[in-house]
Image (cartoon, rainbow, N blue to C red):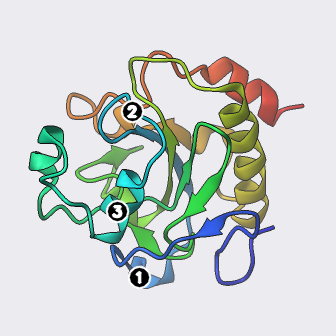
Amino acid sequence: MIDQLGFYQPAKQIPSPFFNERPNGEMPSLLVIHCISLPEGMYGGKAIEHLFTGCLDCCAHPSFKDLDGLEVSAHCVIRRDGTIEQYVSFNKRAWHAGVSSFDGREGCNDFSIGIELEGTDKSAYMDIQYQVLSELTLAIQTHYPKISADRITGHSDIAPGRKTDPGNYFDWEHYFHLLNK
């Protein structure tokens, strides 16, 4: 399901310019779960795609003002309806984690894959998102075996005090149950 170039075949491919090479050819060993909606709490539309491809009109909504000039991406976004959009090859370094640390190592973008769920850290996610996330996670773990269950984390865990996603409504128990079926 993941080809040699690091693309997940079921995903809609939308290339982002916001990535670069991983240092020293490093392969992913961490999976980071995020959430995003633009504007916050509004779903659908093209704002996430436009942010990750560098063409967001920051005048289109007052909350976009702080995003002006931001260069950010994730490897994939899982929409509320379960659609997967892939912006960056898993073999490349997407710019999703920012200032971050996991297991004593700084700069999580260097060694992680970032998956965004369309949602907020203040509301529940859709059942289809958990199903699709678990299928994607299993494909990632097969292709990148260093990503074990104890190397799956939330953005809030690698950037505490700075980030809160995926939030208290993300059901980690349900997600891990789906992974272990």
- In the displayed image of the protein, which residue is found farthest to the right? 181
Q: Quadrant of residue 164?
A: top left
Amino acid, disc 3: His
**Residue 9 appears at what percent x and percent y?**
75, 70
For the point 18% across and 61% down, the residue is: 70
Instruction: Identify which residue, 130 or 63, lies in the foreground.
Output: 63
The count of marks equals 3
Q: Position of residue 14 (x, y in %)?
A: 52, 71
Mark 2 falls on what kind of element?
Answer: loop
Q: Is residue 156 above or below residue 106?
A: above
Residue 176 position within the rendered picture, expressed as x and y whole percent measured from the top left: 72, 28
Secondary structure of the residue carrying tag 3 is: helix
Q: What is the number of the mark on residue 8?
A: none
Q: Residue at x 79, y 36 (%)?
A: 179
Q: Disc 2 residue type?
A: Met
Q: CA distance from mark 1 to mark 3?
A: 22 Å
Question: For the N terminus, which image quadrant?
Answer: bottom right
* Numbered circle sitting on residue 42: 2
| Image position, residue 125 (x, y; %) | 57, 25
What separation in Å lies between label 2 and label 3 (alpha carbons)? 15 Å
Q: Which residue is mark 1?
A: 21
Crowding around mark 3 (Cα neighbors within 10 Å: few <14, some 14 to 19, many 20+) is few
Q: Which mark is residue 50?
A: 3
Is the residue 36 above or below the residue 145 in the image? above
Q: Earlier in the sequence, mark 2 or mark 3?
A: 2
Helix, strand or loop at label 1? It is: loop
Camera-nearest label, 1 or 3: 3
- Of label 1 and label 3, which has the lower sequence position? 1
Quadrant where the C terminus lies? top right
* Amino acid identity at mark 1: Glu
